[in-house]
Amino acid sequence: MSTANSRESYMRAMREEPSSGVISGVRPEPSLEEARTELAQAISRVANNIFKDKYGPLVGVISEPAINEFLKGFEMNLARAKGDLTIVAEEFLDRVIPPRTKRRR
């Protein structure tokens, strides 16, 4: 009887709050800052495992903030480069394929 009761409670909770993800174990999508921090931690662990014999155990501790700052700078530069590339592509297309004007028919 308790399994039927718990199953009914589970089904009711999923109907009432399906987006919570707590019951199903699905983690909510992380923010950009959280994703960047997790990536920096992962890269730091990899760097620590690779270079700990040669440079010592502090490589992971020192590299995590540096990796995080690098990723922030990379994102800013990527956004700037995207804007620059858009401008260059538009200018190139305007020169290769001139816009139609009323004078030219």
Image: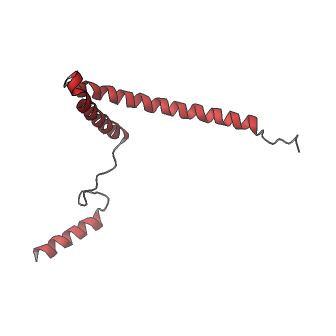
Q: Say which quarter of the image contains residue 68.
A: top left
Side (left or right) of 62 relative to 92: left
Q: Observer-nearest residue: 38 or 59?
A: 59
Q: In the image as oriented, which residue stretches furthest toward the top? A: 55
Q: In the image as oriented, which residue stretches furthest toward the left? A: 1
Q: Observer-nearest residue: 12 or 24?
A: 24
The image shows residue 42, relative to residue 12, as above or below, that is above
The image shows residue 76, relative to residue 17, as above or below, that is above
Side (left or right) of 75 relative to 31: right
State how many labels appear. 0
Q: Residue at x 52, y 30 (%)?
A: 80
Residue 79: x %, y % from top left: 50, 33
Q: Residue at x 34, y 49 (%)?
A: 29
Q: Residue at x 27, y 65 (%)?
A: 14
Q: Observer-nearest residue: 3 or 71?
A: 71
The image shows residue 24, relative to residue 47, as above or below, that is below
Location of the N terminus (image quadrant): bottom left
Location of the C terminus (image quadrant): top right
Q: Say which quarter of the image contains residue 81.
A: top right
Q: Observer-nearest residue: 84 or 18?
A: 84
